[in-house]
Image (cartoon, rainbow, N blue to C red):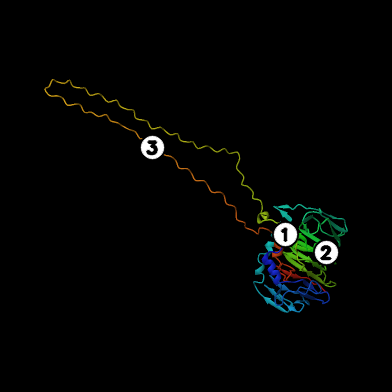
C-alpha cells in the first residue's frame, strides 16, 4: 500500500494544478489550468498545461485558452494542430515521450485493483441498486472497502440516480470495481465529504466504453484501464483525478444548450491493493505427458568375466645318483620364487552437489497499488498539473 512515490511527488510539486475548466460563462471557450474559484492552485507559469500525444483538434468556433489566473502555459502536441489555441502552442513530435510507459502502467494498475491472479477481488461489502439510488454497504472494519458492480449506475429508466455509502470506517479507502464491456454512471449525487472523496476510486478494468453523465459534480477519482476504450464525460464535472489508458471525449453531447464542464483534479490519497507483476501474468499451462505408450527398456549388457589362468605344476627334474668322488660336493644353491600379485582398486570420485535453483528476477514494480496512481500524477487526463496526455484527443461541441 502507499501513495506517491518520491519521483511522482516531486513531479506534482513542480506541476501543481486544480482544474481543466470548460467555462460556463465564456461560451465556446476551453480553459486549461484555470482554477476559477476551485482549489486555486494554478500550474507554474510557462510550464506545459496541455500535452497531446497525437493531433490537437479544436472544433470550429471554439478556442482553447492555456492560462491560469495570470499564468500562461504551453499546449504541447505531437501531431497536427487544427483550430485556435490561445497563448502558446508548441509542436513537439516527442511530446508524449515522458509518459511513454504510463498507458501500460494504468492498464496493469486497473487490472491489479480488480483481479487477483485472474480472479475477481473478493468484495468486502454489497452494492444494491434500489431503482433510485445504489447503496454501497461496507463491512465497517476493512481498511480497503471493495465493491463488485456488474451493472450501470443509473435509475430504473436509465436516467440519473444517486448513490450512498454506508458502513465505511473512518480513513478507509473505497474501491468500486465496475466490470463489463460497457458501463455508464448517470448521477445527480452531490459532493461527498473531502475525506471520503479523496479516498474513493471508480475502476473500470475491462470496459471499451465508459459514460459519465449527470447534472452535478461527480466525487472520487476514475481509472479506465482498457487501452482500446473511449470515455465520454458529459456531467457537470468531476471532483477527483481522471486517468484513462484510452481516449477521452469531454463535453456536452449536444451542439447547443450544454453547460460548463470541469475537471477538478483533487488528489487521490487512498491505499489500494498491492500486487506484483506476477499477479498480472497468465497461469502457464503444463505440457501434457503422452499416455498409452510403454517405452521399451534398453537391455543392459552383461559383463563376460575374464577367465583366470590356472597354475601349472612344474615337472620335477630327476636327481642324478652321485658317483663316488674324492671331492667334497659343494652345497646346493637354490632359491624359491616369491611371486606376489598386486591388485589395484580404483575409487570413483564423488559427484559435485548441484547448486540451488535461482529465483526469477523481479521484473515489475513491487507494488502496483496506489503508488501507480501517484506515479501517474501527470495523468492521461485531467491531472494536477493541468497537463492532459491523451493517445487521441477528441472534442465535442459543448456550448456554454
Residue 110 is marked as: 1
User: Splitting the image into 4 quarters, where does residue 81 fall?
Assistant: bottom right
Q: CA distance from mark 1 to mark 3?
A: 73 Å
Q: Position of residue 286 (x, y in %)?
A: 63, 47
Q: Is residue 123 left or right of residue 339?
A: right
User: Tag 2 or tag 1, which sits nearer the N-term?
Assistant: 1
Q: Quadrant of the N terminus?
A: bottom right
Q: Secondary structure at mark 2?
A: loop
Q: Position of residue 347 (x, y in %)?
A: 43, 39
Q: Position of residue 330 (x, y in %)?
A: 17, 26
Dot 2 corresponds to which residue?
Answer: 193
Between 166 and 223, the one nearer to me in the picture: 166
Q: Quadrant of the C terminus?
A: bottom right
Q: Secondary structure at mark 1?
A: helix
User: Splitting the image into 4 quarters, where does residue 328 fall?
Assistant: top left
Q: Secondary structure at mark 3?
A: loop
Between 303 and 144, the one nearer to me in the picture: 144
Q: Position of residue 128 (x, y in %)?
A: 84, 54
Residue at the spot 38% in from the left edge and 32% down from the top edge: 306
Residue at the spot 70% in from the left edge and 67% down from the top edge: 9
User: Tag 3 or tag 2, which sits nearer the N-term?
Assistant: 2
User: Splitting the image into 4 quarters, where does residue 294 fall?
Assistant: top right
Contact check, label 1 and label 3, Cβ < 8 Å: no
Dot 3 corresponds to which residue?
Answer: 344
Q: CA distance from mark 2 to mark 3?
A: 92 Å
User: Tag 3 or tag 1, which sits nearer the N-term?
Assistant: 1
Q: Would residue 103 be visible to someone looking at this image?
A: yes
Q: CA distance from mark 1 to mark 2?
A: 25 Å
Amino acid at each position: 500500500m502507499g501513495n506517491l512515490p518520491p519521483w511522482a511527488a516531486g513531479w506534482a510539486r513542480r506541476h501543481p494544478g486544480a482544474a481543466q475548466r470548460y467555462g460556463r460563462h465564456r461560451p465556446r471557450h476551453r480553459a486549461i489550468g484555470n482554477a476559477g474559484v476551485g482549489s486555486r492552485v494554478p500550474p507554474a507559469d510557462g510550464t506545459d498545461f496541455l500535452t497531446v500525444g497525437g493531433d490537437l483538434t479544436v472544433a470550429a468556433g471554439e478556442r482553447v485558452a492555456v492560462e491560469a489566473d495570470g499564468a500562461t502555459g504551453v499546449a504541447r502536441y505531437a501531431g497536427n494542430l487544427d483550430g485556435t489555441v490561445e497563448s502558446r502552442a508548441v509542436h513537439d513530435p516527442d511530446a508524449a515521450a515522458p509518459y511513454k510507459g504510463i498507458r501500460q502502467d494504468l492498464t496493469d494498475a486497473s487490472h491489479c485493483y480488480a483481479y487477483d491472479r485472474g480472479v475477481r477481488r473478493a468484495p468486502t461489502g454489497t452494492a444494491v441498486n434500489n431503482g433510485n439510488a445504489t447503496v454501497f454497504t461496507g463491512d465497517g472494519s476493512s481498511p480497503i472497502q471493495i465493491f463488485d458492480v456488474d451493472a450501470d449506475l443509473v435509475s430504473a429508466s436509465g436516467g440519473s440516480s444517486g448513490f450512498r455509502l454506508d458502513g465505511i470506517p473512518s480513513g478507509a479507502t473505497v474501491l468500486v470495481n465496475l466490470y463489463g464491456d460497457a458501463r455508464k454512471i448517470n448521477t445527480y449525487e452531490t459532493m461527498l465529504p473531502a475525506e471520503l472523496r479523496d479516498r474513493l476510486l471508480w475502476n473500470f478494468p475491462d470496459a471499451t466504453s465508459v459514460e459519465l453523465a449527470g447534472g452535478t459534480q461527480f466525487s472520487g477519482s476514475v481509472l479506465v484501464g482498457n487501452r482500446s476504450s473511449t470515455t465520454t464525460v458529459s456531467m457537470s464535472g468531476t471532483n477527483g483525478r481522471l486517468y484513462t489508458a484510452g481516449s477521452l471525449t469531454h463535453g456536452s453531447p449536444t451542439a447547443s444548450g450544454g453547460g460548463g464542464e470541469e475537471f477538478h483534479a483533487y488528489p487521490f490519497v487512498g491505499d489500494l491493493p498491492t500486487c506484483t507483476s506476477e499477479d498480472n501474468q497468465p497461469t502457464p499451462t503444463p505440457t501434457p505427458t503422452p499416455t498409452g505408450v510403454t517405452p521399451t527398456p534398453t537391455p543392459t549388457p552383461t559383463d563376460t568375466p575374464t577367465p583366470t589362468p590356472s597354475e601349472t605344476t612344474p615337472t620335477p627334474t630327476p636327481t642324478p645318483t652321485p658317483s663316488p668322488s674324492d671331492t667334497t660336493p659343494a652345497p646346493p644353491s637354490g632359491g624359491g620364487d616369491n611371486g606376489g600379485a598386486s591388485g589395484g582398486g580404483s575409487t570413483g570420485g564423488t559427484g559435485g552437489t548441484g547448486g540451488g535453483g535461482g529465483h526469477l528476477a523481479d521484473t515489475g514494480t513491487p507494488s502496483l497499488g496506489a503508488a501507480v496512481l501517484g506515479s501517474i500524477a501527470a495523468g492521461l487526463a485531467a491531472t494536477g498539473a493541468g497537463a492532459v496526455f491523451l493517445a487521441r484527443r477528441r472534442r465535442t461541441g459543448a456550448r456554454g
